[in-house]
Amino acid sequence: MEMNTLSQKATEDYSLVLKAIDGDQKAFAKLLSRYRQSVFHAILKMVRNREDAEDLTLEAFGKAFNKLSSYTPNYAFSTWLFKIAINNCIDYMRKKRLHTLSLDEPIEAGSKQDFSEMVRSNTRDPEAEMIREQRIDVLRQIIGGLNDKYRLMVELRYYEQLSYEEIATELDIPLGTVKAQLFRAKQLMSTQLKRPGANAFVDVPASFAA
């Protein structure tokens, strides 16, 4: 997207970006004020914890401001910012999963009793949970293999559960563009899921048919 095709809001954002790069603290503050709530609510939908969402929101803005000079007006600043925020949030969620408590660890040092004995019998069947995790991993790999434009669309629509209208507003693009790009993204994902080996683990979620 060329500079002259940006919307008025996106053009104003770019003007603020240039001022912020020159050290204008008011420009930083205005960008933060303009997008903080929308970024926070997007992250909150993913992590479902207000404190974590607050921390991740500030972290996302910190990362964005630290590399502000790398932003180019080929697309709206909001698109660039949300991509940073979403990727940062996904990284956080992946790392958090790796730090879950091992059920094989003893409850106390020297004890033969481990945490697995305390897990209630109504937890998921281990085999079913393994299959579920495999499906999620395959989907993440396929989504990660999409180009930036389509991956961002899928993440906003299915990770954050934003409506088409909300995506259009957040990314400052026409509603028709959102629908067309999501349709194309789903086609690409469907093709990948039909490859030998992929559909052995995962079916296209019902939500992707929406």
Image (cartoon, helix red, strand yellow):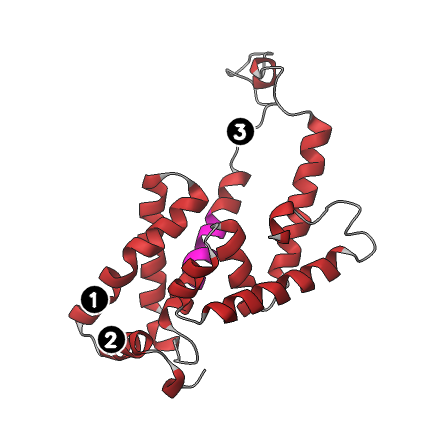
Question: Where does the magenta region start and end?
Answer: 83-92
Could you tell whether 68 is left or right of 183 in the image?
Answer: left
Name the secondary structure under disc 3: loop
Q: Residues within 10 Å of mark 3 (few under 14, many from 20)?
A: few
The mark that comes first in sequence, 3 or 1, is 1
Could you tell whether 65 is left or right of 121 in the image?
Answer: left
Q: Position of residue 163 (x, y in %)?
A: 46, 55
> Which residue is under mark 1?
30
| Quadrant of the drawing holding the N terminus | bottom left
**Who is closer to the viewer here, 74 or 54?**
74
Q: Which quadrant would residue 184 be assigned to in this image? A: bottom right
Give the Cα separation between the discs numbered 1 and 2: 8 Å
Q: Where is residue 52 in the image (x, y as percent from the top left)?
A: 36, 42
Is 86 contained in the magenta span?
yes
> Which residue is under mark 3?
101
> Which residue is under mark 2?
16
Q: What residue type is labelled 2?
A: Leu
Could you tell whether 11 is left or right of 201 in the image?
Answer: left
Q: Where is residue 41 in the image (x, y as percent from the top left)?
A: 35, 49
Q: Which amino acid does label 1 sit on?
A: Lys
Above/below status of 113 relative to 176: above
The residue shown at (69%, 24%) is 125
Is 136 contained in the magenta span?
no
Q: How crowded is mark 2: few (under 14 residues within 10 Å), some or many (20 or more)?
A: some
The mark that comes first in sequence, 3 or 2, is 2
Above/below status of 158 relative to 14: above
Name the secondary structure under disc 2: helix
